[in-house]
Image (cartoon, helix red, strand yellow):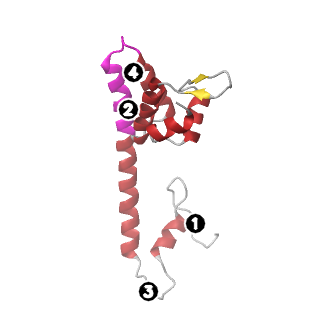
Amino acid sequence: MNIGDVAQRSGLPAKTIRYYEEIGLIRPQRGENGYRRFREQDLHKLAFLGRARALGFTIEDCRTLIALYEDESRESGQVKRVAEEHLQQIDDKIAQLQSMRATLAELVSCCAGDDRPDCPILEDLAHHGADGATEGKGRAL
């Protein structure tokens, strides 16, 4: 198969496939003319990568998962540890997003949204530094 065929069948853009080759996740054969020749196993690996990436696994996680997939002597516990670590990262991100949402919802509910200039949303943004510490009042924007 050429890259167009494998892109269509795997659902991945050719650019992504070339990137995966560049970083060593896949290694298609090359013909005498230098063109890539993909085998069924390359297509299977690309589908595997596509699914793993859709689940949010990092490139390094994908590298680990492919190595485990190809290692017939692997222990399922090794795979589970990778997945559990990723699941914890997702849970942490969800908690951060829920906290952000709660804060923003509170600010929105405190804002009258009328024609007056005072706005608790802008006040909060102006008086909380990157580390969450309150800075001095003023309009140093």
Cα gap from disc 2 to disc 1, whole angstroms: 40 Å
Q: Position of residue 124 (x, y in %)?
A: 48, 68
Going by the numbered disc 4, the residue's amino acid type is Tyr
Q: Which residue is mark 4?
A: 69
N-terminal of the pair, mark 1 or mark 4, is: 4
What numbered label is drawn on residue 85? 2
The answer to which of 141 and 83 lies nearer the viewer is 83
Q: Label 1 belongs to which residue?
A: 136
Identify the residue at horizontal 57%, vertical 66% (top origin): 136
Magenta stretch: includes residue 43: no
Rendered location of residue 34, percent (x, y): 67, 26
Q: Which residues are magenta?
A: 71-89
What residue type is disc 2 on? Answer: Glu
Percent of width and height locating residue 119: 48, 78
Question: Identity of the amino acid at label 3?
Answer: Asp
Contact between labelled residues 4 and 2, with CB atoms less than 8 Å apart:
no
95 on left or right of 42: left
